[in-house]
Amino acid sequence: MNRRSWLLATTSSVAWVGLSGCASPKVSDYATEQPSLDLRQYFQGKIDAWGVFTDRSGRVVKRFAVEMDCQWSGDEGVLDEHFTYSDGTIQRRVWRLRHEGGGRYSGRADDVVGIASGQTSGNAFRWGYTLSLPVDGRVWEVQFDDWMFLMNDRVMLNKARMSKWGIDLGEVTLSFIRRGH
């Protein structure tokens, strides 16, 4: 192989690796994964969760626990979340969800700007929304790319990227455990 052919092959390989690294996963990538996730089934009753927020460097900035009371009536659901943070602060968020059919969901909460939207496929749920987040006496609107993965009938793992103006601010990692099952 001459030098020019080698350089072209090497450049093409590097470009392919770079481009494939930029491709983000789609919820449909998990279509065959089990157990199959139905949010209306999983988020029914009492659920406990524990999580951390890490900054861009991976340093844990906050730890928190969540107690959830979840109720569905047909295609309408309410997820009442009570957060307790490691610094002693508490917060409440009430999600009002709607199953739109075909695994699609929409949702609202008082601190969510506009309408959140998401899709389930297989054991995964991808949820996108903008959150009004109080930071040092100001309110920032930050975007969440939120992924949940059902592990079994009791446990679900959650990983969410938080960004502003397309710049990563950090990540939220949570584990949910359904009570009494």
Image: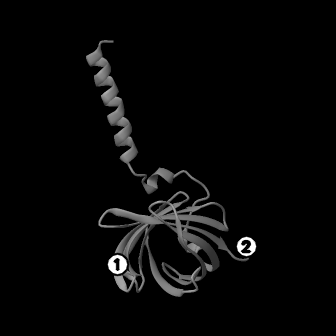
Q: CA distance from mark 1 to mark 2?
A: 38 Å
Up-down relation of residue 65 to residue 127 (above or below) = below
Judging depth in this view, the residue of 167 and 66 nearest the camera is 167
- As drawn, is 147 to the left or to the right of 15? right
Looking at the rendered structure, the secondary structure element under dot 1 is: strand
Up-down relation of residue 167 to residue 3 (above or below) = below
Q: Position of residue 146 (x, y in %)?
A: 46, 66
Looking at the rendered structure, the secondary structure element under dot 2 is: loop
| Residue at the left extreme, as displayed | 4
Asked if labels 2 and 1 touch by Cβ distance under 8 angstroms, the answer is: no
The three-letter amino acid code for the residue at tag 1 is: Trp
Residue 61 visible, this angle: yes
Up-down relation of residue 47 to residue 56 (above or below) = below
Q: Position of residue 19 (x, y in %)?
A: 34, 41
Q: Residue placed at 38% from the left, 86% from the top?
A: 137
The three-letter amino acid code for the residue at tag 2 is: His
Q: Badge 2 is on which residue?
A: 181
Judging depth in this view, the residue of 131 and 124 nearest the camera is 131
